[in-house]
Image: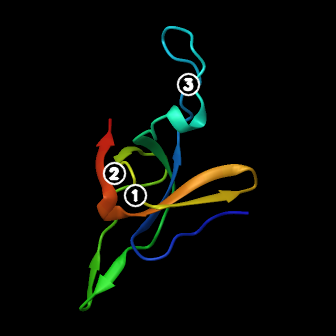
Amino acid sequence: MKLNPLGDRVVLQYRKEEEKSVSGIYLPDSAKEKPQEATVVAVGPGLEKDGKKTPMLVKEGDRVIASKYSGTEVKLDDEEYTIISQTEILAIVE
């Protein structure tokens, strides 16, 4: 099954965080900070407003930095994704 976002929405998959601290202590889920770097999995067609279409600035495969607590988290086929608006992407990592 594949997610196809609508409008200016983007589907991200965050990279897994280490479960162990630098000193070797295992961290519980509640102590982990949500990562900001993610990979773009799917991109919507863009948003049309007042007859003008807003171009999508990211494409599938891009690594991006997104706002820390943005988007809607979804689980599909045992994989976790976050769907956000393109405006919540802060930068493209090159």
Q: How far apart are marks 1 and 3 (CA)?
A: 21 Å
In this rendering, would 45 be left or right of 55? Answer: right
Which residue is located at x 37 percent, y 55 percent? 58
Which numbered circle lies on residue 18?
3
Sequence-wise, which precedes: disc 1 or disc 3? 3
Which residue is located at x 46 percent, y 69 percent? 44
Residue most toward the bottom? Answer: 50
- Would you identify the image quadrant in which residue 8 lies? bottom left
Foreground of the two, 79 or 19:
19
Which numbered circle lies on residue 85?
none
Label 1: element kind: loop
Badge 3 crowding class, 10 Å Cα cut-off, few under 14, some 14 to 19, many 20 or more, is few
In this rendering, would 58 be left or right of 33? Answer: left
Which residue is located at x 60 percent, y 19 percent? 26
Foreground of the two, 88 or 56:
88
Label 2: element kind: loop
Whole-percent x and y of residue 62?
A: 42, 45
Which numbered circle lies on residue 67?
2
Please indicate, yes or no, whether residue 57 appears anywhere in the rendered image: no
Q: Distance between the residues labelled 2 and 3?
A: 20 Å
Which numbered circle lies on residue 70?
1
Q: How far apart are marks 1 and 2 (CA)?
A: 6 Å
Whole-percent x and y of residue 35?
A: 44, 38
Looking at the picture, which amino acid does disc 3 mark? Glu
Q: Is mark 1 in CB contact (under 8 Å) with mark 2?
A: yes
